[in-house]
Every structure is written in structure tokens, then in C-alpha cells.
Amino acid sequence: MTRIAISGANGRMGQTLAEAAELNSNIEIGCTLDLGDKLEEMLDSFDVLIDFTRPEATLEYLAICQKAGKGMVIGTTGFSDEELLLIEAAANDIAIVFAPNMSVGVNLTLKLLDTAAKVFGDDADIEIIETHHRYKVDAPSGTALKMGEVVANALGRDLSACAVYGREGIEEPRSRQTIGFSTVRGGDVVGDHTVSFFMEGERVEITHKASSRMTFANGAVRAASWLSGKQSKLYSMQDVLDL
């Protein structure tokens, strides 16, 4: 039995995580916390913290868990490059599952994208379109960026050098060496992602659509159960799912 702590417990994702944990026989909710609660006062009640908050809060929790030797499942997105280095450094001391999307379906999609990119190579124009609810503050989504990273790596490219974020005005014809991103925000969309490979005479589109936050919560709870007892390291959902 893995005892978990859930941060942001009063938020939409926190409540969904609690619901998913209640349905998992391998998980016990040791504690929950929200604004004003102090994680350092709850260290005896959990083994793994599941965190889907904001980068600044996540990094505070990370420092506490690192010092206390507690595992973390991090689903927060929007970290800077410098902040990502802090997560990597903490994984020298504690076991961490860090993924921009905990959905089993999304992580299977990443595997399919790797295969597709290798098959199509440089013969395709590649575009990524993502849609989320009006309250999402980071863009493109962490999932879209991860999809772009997987495709770029499969093609031997550096995403930071080949990504194009939106287009406006009159431009030169697109280069096939670029990967385009488009962002849509509105309504209550949980998360839609489509990666299109455009070739001459045909195109292939790989799409994942989430209709409930429960898909992310179930994956995070599964990751927390899997993480218990693992050695200090930075893991991904690909590790959890053995993909």
C-alpha cells in the first residue's frame, strides 16, 4: 500500500486525484494540502506526493520532499529550463515521475509519434495543434511540447531550433525542417492534441482527445503506486507503462 499526499486538494485536479485514489486498492490517501497548509508538518503521513499545481509551488514542495526523502509524481507544466534542472538534480536524491501528461493514452500516442516520424522522415511537413480550456495559462501545452520533442528527437532535430510557434503576415514557404505549433484556448476543453504529417498527396493525423481529467488522475495514481520503493532517479510515464 502506497500512502500519497495530494497538493492543490481543493482545485479541480486535486479533487479528481482524490477520486482516482479512492478507486485504487493499492493507494491510501495519507494527507491533502492546499493554500496555507505546510507540507513539512505532514511528512509522517505519506510516501509519495502527487503535485499538479504551479511551478513555484512545485519547486517548494520538491525541496521539502528532497530533504525528507519522499517520492514525487509531478504533473505540473510551464517550467523554465533552469527549473527543469532543479527537478533533474533532485532526482539524484529521490525517485520522481515527471511527465507533462499522465494519461495512458497520451503516452501511447507518444510512442506512435516516434514511429510515425521515423517512417516519414524529412518527407513530411509537421504541425501540432492543441486545444485547452480557457483557464490554462501556459502555451503551448506541456503535452504539445513533449509531442514536438518526441518527433524532433526521432528526426535528429533540436526542437528549440526548429519549432515555429504560430504564424502571421507574409512569410517564406515553410521549411520541412520546422515543426509548427498552434494553440487554441476556450470553453471547458480538457485537452485535445493532433499531430499532422503532411506529404504530397496524403496526410496522416494522430490525435488524442481527453474528455475527463480522470484520465490524468488515474495515470498519476498509477505512477505513484509504481514509484514506491524505486531507487532515486527521474522517471517518465514511459517507464511506468513499460513503453
Image (cartoon, rainbow, N blue to C red):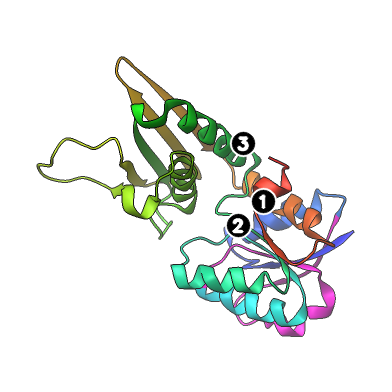
Q: Which of marks 2 and 1 is in front?
A: 1
Disc 2 + disc 1, Cβ < 8 Å: yes
From the top left corner, tell me how far across and down residue 109 is, in percent: 56, 35
The image's mark for residue 217 is 1
Horizontal arrangement in the rendering, residue 49 relative to residue 76 (left or right): right
- For badge 2, the amino acid type reads Met
- The x and y percentages for residue 147 are 48, 43
- The label on residue 108 is 3
- 46 or 239, which is in the foreground? 239
| Residue 13 numbered mark, or none | 2
Q: How many numbered circles does the render carry?
A: 3
- Mark 1 is surrounded, within 10 Å at the Cα level, by few (under 14), some (14 to 19) or many (20 or more) other residues, namely many
> Considering the numbered disc 3 on the image, is that residue within a helix, a strand or a loop?
helix
Pick whichever, 82 or 101, lies toward us. 82
Q: Which of marks 2 and 3 is nearer the N terminus?
A: 2
Is tag 1's residue or tag 3's residue first in the polypeptide sequence?
3
**Residue extending furthest toward the front:** 156
Q: Which residue type carries mark 3?
A: Leu
Q: Which amino acid does label 1 sit on?
A: Ala
Residue drawn where x is 61% and y is 73% of the image: 89
Farthest top residue?
Answer: 201
User: Gap in Å between the C-alphas at discs 1 and 3?
Assistant: 16 Å
Name the secondary structure under disc 2.
Answer: helix
Mark 3 residue crowding within 10 angstroms, few (<14) / some (14–19) / many (20+): some
Q: Which residue is rendered at x = 31% and y = 14% of the image? A: 201
In the rendered image, residue 57, in percent from the top left (x then y), is placed at 56, 75
| Range drawn in magenta | 27-55
In percent of width and height, residue 190 lies at 51, 45
